[in-house]
Amino acid sequence: MSAPLDHDALLRYSRHLTLPQVGVKGQERLASARVLLVGAGGLGSPAALYLAAAGVGTLAVVDGDAVELSNLQRQILHGNDDVGRPKVDSALDRLQDVNPLVHVRTIPERLHAGNATGLISDVDLVIDGSDNFPTRYLINDACVFAGRPYVYGAILRFEGQVSVFGAEGGPCYRCLFHEPPPPDLVPSCADAGVLGVLPGIIGSLQALEAVKLLLGIGDPLVGRLLLFDGIGATFREIGLRRDPDCPVCGDHPTVTELIDYEAFCGVEPTAHAFDVGVRDFAEEWRGGGVQLVDVREAGELAVSSIEGAMHIPLGELPRRLGELESARPIVVVCHTGVRSARATEMLRAAGFARARNLAGGIDAWSREVDPTVPRY
């Protein structure tokens, strides 16, 4: 049980105290709550800021990344002076400035099967600020095993979604997504982009759901997936049910301990069979005779390009194969090598036996070969 609110706390939380659903008892309940925030990035930033401002007593922040300049368009926990610092360190400084009454615990590593059980068992709920499927499945399974709610959020381009998984009687993440999609089918935010304000909207909704769960008020998004379309400024809702055949939360679960989630999601860091490194390709490119095909979108091409490349967006590739010479070697490039790997497989299946993927994409080209090519 937390100590009674002192004079400064009463003043700080005065707008909460006048709410019948919160009041002094509710604010004291928030002060004794413990929340684990997985990721101090786009979603984690607004969620952490609002939970700290709301007076959640302990915020544990787990993130193994450092702040990069490209983060600042949306990750509002961090500023220019934080570039290069561990995200948990800049998050600690910012959150303590927002509310020194909140205890911020920093874990400067990624969430993994070795630490997830201990971290999640020590809190009341988990907020998912991750951006990849292995971490989402890991959070889900560990939350179900520990009996902790999991406030889910995801964003891409102009769209986002929020739900609460793992709550008593409700579905878990695996009830919605039984199996992960192939890793090259769903683009990341780095490849597809994300509007900077979108994670502010979705992360704030996650903070709202967390506060409701901690206070035991309202109607949390248990059994409901809330979808937001930023372009149309519309919300819609999909009803979800617990799947009795779910391998984790079903009536007869088959997954009863944490597994290798990288392997489960098929994203082990193994080289593509038809990869070519940027340094090796640079020698070929200088020698001529190679077709370089850029499968990024037009907006990306306007930011940076490799002079002499042919531009065919990935979505147009199947109907534009006739523009390529099957007898010549082809190298495919995208931003980081994910879309180009998929394009390479498409080309080889279509009879372009000499097609290869530029490993690391134009980002690696800029870092290792030609630093005059802008990074994004």
Image (tube, rainbow, N blue to C red):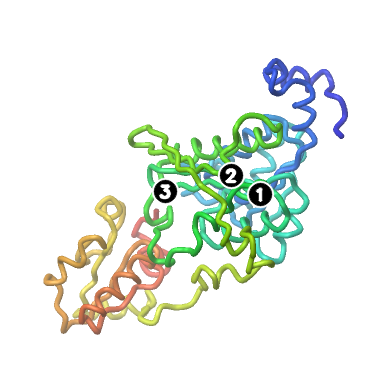
- For marks 3 and 1, the one nearer the N-term is 1
Q: Which residue is mark 2?
A: 164
Direction from residue 144 to residue 172 in the image, left or right: left
| Of 351 and 137, the residue lying toward us | 137
Three-letter residue code for mark 1: Val
Query: Mark 1 Cα within 10 Å, few/some/many (few <14, many 20+)?
Result: many
- For marks 2 and 1, the one nearer the N-term is 1
Q: Which residue is mark 1?
A: 88
Three-letter residue code for mark 2: Val
Query: Mark 3 Cα within 10 Å, few/some/many (few <14, many 20+)?
Result: many
Q: Which residue is mark 3?
A: 156
Asked which quadrant contains residue 284, the reply is bottom left
Residue drawn at (51%, 61%), measured in percent from left and top? 178
Query: Mark 2 Cα within 10 Å, few/some/many (few <14, many 20+)?
Result: many
Q: Nearer the viewer, mark 2 or mark 3?
A: 2
In the figure, 103 relative to 179: above or below? above
